[in-house]
Image (spheres, rainbow, N blue to C red):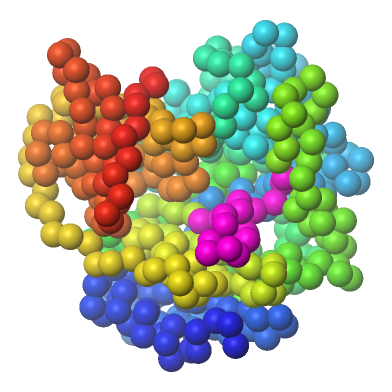
């Protein structure tokens, strides 16, 4: 057995829920070769005596992006689309997709976060911060695209873009002439028997849905993505995601074998672009010599993580109904040398002039592959790191902020005019200086 036994996994969950108070309920799923285990702990909601199990439904946030990329791989293998197709080919003729230096944004640009589109569309109103995407419409999406000017060349940099993936899912659904949810279900979920992976609740899903909670364990609304479901709208269960991992570990004898195999292979960039190679599968990280394929997700009241080690033929799913990160649990279970997060340090939130927030919003980068975007929504300040969900940060001085979902802090360094020129990101014992680029 490569992965910890059930009782040791349960000890981790007890610590997170009963000791640290970082979740109301967590379900862990493990697959080793063809053997699956499910370890639940906690409850569906604060004050609800019902326990969780492998069929408990959670929002999975950005893990949805893996499904969207697999749809692209599948439709490419069927000859329905090509990676270098311009996105505009699958939008109404009235939409003017932004171009730059004679290049059009293609499907592969969206799938690899190299389109040059921003993380979020700038015309989102955020009228409901508890459900921020609910009011955003297709008409607003088309209006934004038609009036947006790219600030850099397509394929020149990688910038994590929820907008790009939402647009990719929308374009693929238009090509298939069905809505995004129906496309995911007909091409992926139904063939694999993943009956509880949907956007719209079935009656069975409603009975087993875990309520979402913020880091303070207060109930929060579920999120809706009517215009951009392809980047974060799916709900799922540990049992369904274990099926999903199992076919990635061994796609033999599934209708998705060509697409899964293709998605995990390196895909050359379209003609005319620099010789960068990418794939359409999961993110990949070298952890203590192991190649871990993984993706995390987060919405207002949920955190999720799914990953697998193809060399050891093992996989792990971690779903939580609270906004504390669970990435460390997933990595630790696939490799026990990867440490669990320490309990967060004590920090005290203070009141400051929220006008200062406008001096800090922007994008900060260190190296070509990691950026942190700071945004303001009303009286709240948020940060969004590459490959992670967006989390609120809280002031403990006019320039020092802390996260409640992890032991991390941000210090803004300002110029003579008061605007931030860089931020210092403190995580555990590491410190990174990120220069402001917007």
In the displayed structure, 357 sits above or below 285; it is: above
Residue depicted at x 79% and y 70%: 250
Residue sitting at the far top:
101
Residue 235 in sight in this render: no
In the displayed structure, 94 sits above or below 265; it is: above
Image quadrant occupied by the C terminus: top left
The magenta stretch spans which residues?
279-296
In the displayed structure, 172 sits above or below 100; it is: below
Give x and y (percent) for residue 298. 44, 54
Q: Is residue 240 left or right of residue 46?
A: right
Q: Is residue 302 left or right of residue 160?
A: left
Give x and y (percent) for residue 36. 64, 83
Residue 77 lies in the magenta-colored region? no
Residue depicted at x 34% and y 26%: 435
Give x and y (percent) for residue 12. 37, 79
Give x and y (percent) for residue 46. 29, 73
Residue 290 lies in the magenta-colored region? yes
In this orientation, which residue lies closer to the viewer: 196 or 417? 417
All told, the count of numbered labels is 0
Residue depicted at x 19% and y 42%: 401
In this orientation, which residue lies closer to the viewer: 378 or 362? 362
Residue depicted at x 63% and y 79%: 31
Residue 368 in sight in this render: yes
């Amino acid at each position: 057995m490569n992965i910890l036994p059930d009782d040791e996994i349960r000890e981790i969950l007890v610590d997170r829920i009963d000791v640290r108070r970082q979740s109301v309920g967590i379900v862990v799923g493990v697959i080793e070769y063809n053997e699956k285990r499910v370890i639940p702990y906690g409850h569906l909601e604060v004050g609800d005596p019902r326990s969780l199990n492998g069929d408990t439904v959670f929002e999975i946030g950005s893990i949805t992006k893996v499904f969207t990329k697999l749809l692209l791989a599948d439709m490419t293998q069927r000859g329905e689309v090509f990676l270098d197709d311009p996105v505009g080919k699958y939008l109404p003729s009235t939409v003017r997709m932004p171009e730059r230096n004679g290049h059009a944004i293609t499907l592969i640009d969206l799938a690899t976060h190299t389109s040059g589109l921003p993380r979020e569309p700038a015309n989102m109103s955020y009228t409901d911060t508890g459900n921020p995407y609910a009011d955003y419409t297709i008409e607003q999406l088309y209006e934004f695209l038609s009036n947006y000017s790219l600030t850099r060349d397509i394929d020149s940099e990688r910038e994590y873009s929820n907008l790009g993936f939402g647009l990719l899912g929308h374009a693929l659904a238009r090509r298939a002439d069905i809505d995004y949810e129906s496309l995911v279900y007909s091409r992926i979920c139904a063939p694999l028997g993943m009956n509880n992976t949907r956007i719209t609740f079935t009656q069975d899903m409603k009975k087993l849905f875990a309520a979402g909670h913020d880091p303070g364990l207060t109930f929060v609304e579920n999120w809706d993505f009517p215009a951009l479901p392809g980047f974060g709208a799916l709900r799922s269960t540990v049992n369904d995601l274990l099926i999903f991992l199992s076919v990635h570990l061994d796609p033999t004898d599934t209708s998705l074998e060509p697409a899964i195999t293709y998605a995990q292979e390196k895909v050359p960039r379209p003609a005319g672009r620099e010789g960068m190679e990418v794939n359409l599968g999961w993110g990949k990280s070298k952890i203590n010599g192991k190649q871990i394929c993984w993706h995390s997700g987060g919405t207002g009241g949920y955190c999720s993580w799914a990953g697998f080690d193809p060399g050891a033929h093992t996989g792990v799913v971690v779903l939580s109904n609270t906004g504390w990160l669970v990435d460390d649990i997933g990595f630790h279970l696939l490799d026990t040398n990867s440490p669990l997060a320490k309990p967060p340090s004590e920090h005290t939130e203070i009141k400051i002039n929220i006008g200062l927030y406008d001096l800090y919003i922007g994008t900060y980068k260190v190296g070509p592959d990691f950026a942190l975007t700071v945004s303001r929504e009303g009286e709240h300040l948020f940060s969004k790191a590459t490959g992670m969900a967006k989390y609120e940060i809280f002031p403990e001085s006019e320039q020092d902020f802390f996260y409640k979902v992890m032991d991390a802090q941000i210090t803004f360094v300002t110029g003579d005019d008061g605007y931030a020129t860089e931020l210092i990101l403190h995580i555990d014992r590491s410190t990174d200086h990120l220069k402001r680029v917007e």
